[in-house]
Image (cartoon, rainbow, N blue to C red):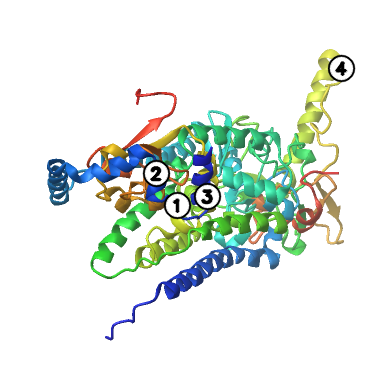
Amino acid sequence: MSKKPRLTPKQRARRKFLGSIALAAGVTGASLLGFVPVAAKRLNERLRPPGALFEEEFLAACIKCGQCVQVCPVEAIKLADLTDGFGVGVPHIEAREQACDFSCDGLQCVLACPTGALIHEVAFPSQVDMGIAKVVAPAKCLAVQGKGFKGLARGPDFKGKLRYAEIDRWHPLQVADHPYDLELCDLCVRQCPIEIQIADCAKEDEKKRESLGLVAKRQPGECPPKHAIELQPIDTGDGVKRMKPVILEGCVGCGVCEMICPVEPAVIVIDSTESREKSRGMRA
Amino acid sequence: MSRVIESLRVLLGGEPKRVAKKDLPQEVRELHEHKFSDKERIEAIRIELEHKKRKKMPEKKRRLRWAVLIAVNLLFVVSYYFDIQLLEGALTASRFAGFHMADLNSALQVMLAFKHVVINLLIGTTTIFVLWWLLGGRTFCSWVCPYHLVAEWAEMLHLKLREKGLAKDIQFDRRTRSWLWLLFAVLALATGYTVYETISPTGILSRALIYGPGVALVWVGLLLLFEIFFSRRAWCRYACPIGLTYGFVGATSPFTVHYRLPNCYHEGECRKVCLVPHVLDTVIKGKAQAMEVDIGADCTRCLRCVDACPTGALTFKYKGLGDLL
């Protein structure tokens, strides 16, 4: 091996200068690679936690700390990996694995967010705009086929949780511990947090009216003003009782229907694309 | 004031200012001249250093610092794991017993990208600013940042490999960090994305510890490999904008490493262990401009120099507390 010629101070300075430029360019270049998943619009398909500003603003405002992750009682929120580029460390929800069922009541993730990436103006689930449920394979839907459902909605190994308020008001329970026996499958409607809340409000009103002759006073939005999903009868003329799930205006895109749907893959899924592009995290 | 300006200049990448011999204060000049007349003292130091070299003494302050660094990071992990809500979040932003805290560099990125500051972020940023001003600014780096710890381990390996000639130490211009800081600020402002957070090894490691590992660790691994084989502590020295942000905070901090010229016999042990040796320029023979010097803003207060100094010329002090420490 031949000995390298000694560099003059000038050559050394030049080499250091070029090396420094290369270092700066390398670091900046690596960071800008984060733009690739954003440019490919891959992130717009992400379901974000309640109150998330529209995607561009959300990525700017999120400080990537995961406080929302820590407060969620059903651990629905996950932080993205480096494969999300600029979205690394930003929270999202995989509804099929674990949807947001609002079992915290007070939108704890919104309260925990230190930067307002989850908009602090939302106080109740019905005000949230995460996306909207869509029935993507109606022919596979058990209700459309006129079938019931018996057993565990997602099998014995499913890790997801839901609040079954009639059993435990305060702690979410394993879906895998709750077998159903339904004459006609209505899981998406039955477990819809918005629908449950509407029913609860009606019950509360009823009780108050009976005992006091008063109507319960509430803050706007505390009780969902609009229904989110219902089953509508369909008639195919073969005498079988069939129903189809229809998504209504009150759907906030929480994903519980997607999680609970016993068909594989889910007949009903959340589409967050439109909300992510336009919505400020809440209903207008 | 001029001390602070000089310290900021060096922080930004400038070469430490040198003063001609004749312009030094007389007492300093005299001291420089007569320093080595005490042959007995110098012989004693030489023997002590040789003894140290033969029998490696544990660096006590370094161990304490590692313990603190691990404890702080573990507190995040434990708090989440056992749901005790003591320290929620990650290093980028958190809540300690309910009080907001926001990492200054992450907060800056968010403010520039989002162009809107909610009150909680302002509270968190102010809290952290005051906290780290009190604690010394870049103290964050060496006492809290998880990347600093793994980089120290990588550095140990790097030094071993260097001895065997298996690794290089490419030196970069220290101004690179200042340019990167500016570049990432402009990028956040212009693109509306917190671009730096994408590659921040501090954020990545903190989240990996708390929420579980991911692909992002590959980036941290690449940085470490680069440091091991090509350039000692490159990220912390030449690149990390977080270090510069906290350097600004620490420029006027009451907590500094303190240098006493009369005690110094210029063996240079301190500069060998230092992450940022330019802050110790003053210890080179003939360079000190005063009998006592506070070490500048880029110093991470890791106190390795204090452990390394054989003659007690380097100590740490908290202004206003006198000799209490």
Left or right of A225, for residue B198: left
Q: Quadrant of residue A32?
A: bottom right
Q: Which kind of residue does numbered mark 3 sit on?
A: Arg
Tell me how many marks there are.
Answer: 4
In primary-sequence order, the first of circles 3 and 1 is 3
Which residue in the structure is indicated by mark 1?
B16
The chain under label 1 reads: B
Q: Residue at x 36, y 65 (%)?
A: B169
Q: Residues within 10 Å of mark 4 (few under 14, many from 20)?
A: few
Q: Which kind of residue does numbered mark 4 sit on?
A: Leu
In primary-sequence order, the first of circles 1 and 2 is 1
Q: Residue at x 50, y 53 (%)?
A: B204
Dot label at residue B24: 2
**Could you say where residue B102 lies in the image, as x and y percent from the top left?**
58, 39
Q: Is residue B167 above or below residue A234?
A: below
The chain under label 4 reads: A
The chain under label 3 reads: B
Left or right of B62, for residue A185: right
B267 or A214: which is nearer to us?
A: B267
Residue B302 appears in view: yes
Which residue in the structure is indicated by mark 3?
B9
